[in-house]
Image: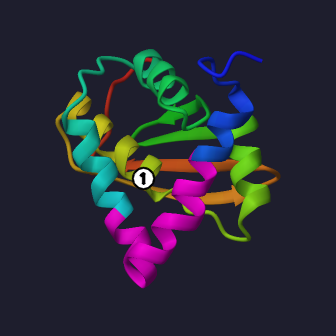
Amino acid sequence: MDDSVQSPEINTFSLAVLRDRLLPDLLQEDEANILYWAGKGLATRESLTSITTIEVYFNRAGFGNLKALAHKGSEIEWILSGPVVLARLTERDEPNFYLEAGFLAQVIETLANVGTETTLKIEDEEVHFTTLCEQAIDLPI
């Protein structure tokens, strides 16, 4: 194997080491809050203009396969899945996906120009996010 080319397995492993071993040790009990706000900060530096560009960004960033499932009034339901998510769920009893949640909150806040918050729950080897907006928004899914 050519050492200059990394396989997806190596990238998944390195992500899991950083996100699920190193960061929890460094951030300890503040991990969820710091990563949520870090995700919001990261989103402010990106120019994402639609649900589709958000989904593509998640894949390119190595967060996993994001899909917007439903949009009703002031809520957007998302699902995050794929090999990266599965590897992280396998690596750690309670992996932290607050970086991704904060990112979603901020990017929707920027697109819709309304205050938002994103919550998450892990079910069946997937991460389910709900983005709650202060008022109904009009974003095509």
Regarding residue 114, the answer to whether it shows in the image is yes
On screen, 113 above or below 24?
above
Residue plotted at (69% across, 53% down): 88
Q: Identify the magenta region.
A: 15-34
Of residue 16 and residue 107, the one placed in the foreground of this image is 16
Q: Where residue 23 appears, x then y in whole percent?
A: 46, 66
Q: Is residue 35 left or right of residue 60?
A: left
Amino acid tagged 1: Leu
How many neighbours does mark 1 have within 10 angstroms: few (below 14), some (14-19), or many (20 or more)?
A: many
Q: Quadrant of residue 77?
A: top right
On screen, 117 above or below 126?
below
On screen, 111 above or below 53?
below
Q: Where residue 16 appears, x then y in whole percent?
A: 62, 52
Q: Is residue 141 left or right of residue 107?
A: right
Residue plotted at (51% across, 65% down): 22
Residue 17 within the segment the image draws in magenta: yes
Of residue 103 and residue 135, the one placed in the foreground of this image is 103
Residue 113 within the segment the image draws in magenta: no
Q: Say which residue label 1 marks.
A: 99
Residue plotted at (63% across, 17% down): 5
Q: Where residue 70 appears, x then y in whole percent?
A: 57, 32
Q: Quadrant of residue 42?
A: top left
